[in-house]
Image (cartoon, grey):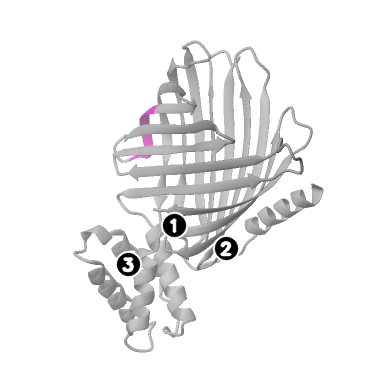
Amino acid sequence: MKSAKYVLGAILFTMLVAPAVFAISLCQYTQPITSVTTSSLQVNLRYLEDEYRDDRGNLLSLTLAGSFLRYYDSVDFGYGINANGSLSNTNGNWALLGAGSVNFRFYAPGTDLFAFGRVNSQWAELTPTVAVILGAGYGRLRDVTPLAKAVRISDKLLTEKLLKKPVPDDTLMSIAQEIGKREEYASLDDLVVKVVQLIEASGATVGKLGADAVLYIRQIITATGDTRLCGFSVNAGVGYKVLDPVGARDFVLFGSAEYSIPWSVDTQLHMRVDGTSVPNFTSYGVQGVVTLIHKLTPTTTLNGNLTIARTLPAGGTAVNSQSLDATLSFTLFEGWAVNVTLGMRNITGYEEPRIELTVSAGITF
């Protein structure tokens, strides 16, 4: 048990101290509109044949888990949709779990100060808890993926010896601006031609870029799953629990803080803390999540996720939980991946942490 804990700790430490040196700061990139959409679907199958003839401990489980994130932000308006859930069957017994939120943000002219409306929902089986919240906040998360792609293009062409020196920072920014306007181009080919022209005009090439360079540029521009975000956001509000199957309707306090930074084109750090409570704090829930994604190779990604939560139900006893997951994801085809996860769970009331190894296959859209 202890050795497994040390392995998890070592993996997370390695990710935290991974090299993150690059010539241009990705957070220098800005664009009027940030639009990020990600979704995933995973299937886990587990079978256990026990050592008893009466099969008392046999286990057959099937879990279908999915997530969806939509984040949009413009000069004066933004919204977010976040949902995740799982449907599982263990020895014939079905279970449904999930959570989601929808929020709308309205910014004061020329500032990052906003008012927001939010609907939070959690559900177990078909009994959801729903709260409607109004409040205010400050800050933004910006999508800097176009600049990350521009840097990755320069690095790839340099590695393949198609450049005599790295693409200058001002050219990288120009390439990022063009990639960020991809929807304005009539075709992907037109965008690739523009990127090639910018690189050749920078003086970084030995001569004209050939078919190999064009192919690398196309692949990097169209690659999915490498979103890079930069920025922070804090907000607080007051709401009302309009639906709660196990408790009375009541006012709730809400607060959250979010911070995201790409240490490099291959490393993304994201932290979020949020909580809700009744006004007299006799019932509340708070959760903090730290996620670190590091791309080891073009087809291999290491994902670390640390979650710490505390929940105090009305009239009940507080429950603390901590979980640490380290996942190696191997991309087989575009969007398809095999994941190997080593995880640890520690929850109040149990004698020791639970250690588990999971192998799953999934697709990201």
Camera-nearest label, 3 or 1: 1
- Between 182 and 19, the one lying in front of the other is 182
Q: Is residue 310 left or right of residue 332?
A: right
Q: Position of residue 199 (x, y in %)?
A: 34, 77
Mark 3 is surrounded, within 10 Å at the Cα level, by few (under 14), some (14 to 19) or many (20 or more) other residues, namely some
User: At 51% from the left edge and 32% from the top edge, which residue is drawn?
Assistant: 97
**What's the amino acid at mark 2?**
Ala
- Between 294 and 300, the one lying in front of the other is 300
Residue on which disc 1 sits = 225
- Helix or strand or loop: what does disc 3 sit on? helix
Residue on which disc 3 sits = 174
User: At 37% from the left edge and 43% from the top edge, which residue is drawn?
Assistant: 70
> Marks 1 and 2, how far apart in space?
19 Å
Q: Is residue 152 in view from this perspective? A: yes
Residue on which disc 2 sits = 20
Q: Is residue 23 left or right of residue 167?
A: right
- Determine the image quadrant of residue 180: bottom left
358 inside magenta stretch? no
- Between 184 and 205, the one lying in front of the other is 184
- Determine the image quadrant of residue 328: bottom right
The answer to whether 314 is drawn above or below residue 203 in the figure is above
Q: Position of residue 40 (x, y in %)?
A: 44, 48
The answer to whether 279 is drawn above or below residue 58 in the figure is above
- Helix or strand or loop: what does disc 1 sit on? loop
Q: The magenta stretch spans which residues?
A: 111-118
Camera-nearest label, 1 or 2: 1
What's the magenta bit mostly, secondary-structure-wise? strand
Q: Are marks 2 and 3 in contact (CB under 8 Å)?
A: no
The answer to whether 42 is drawn above or below residue 179 in the figure is above
Q: Are marks 1 and 2 in contact (CB under 8 Å)?
A: no
The mark nearer the N terminus, 1 or 2, is: 2
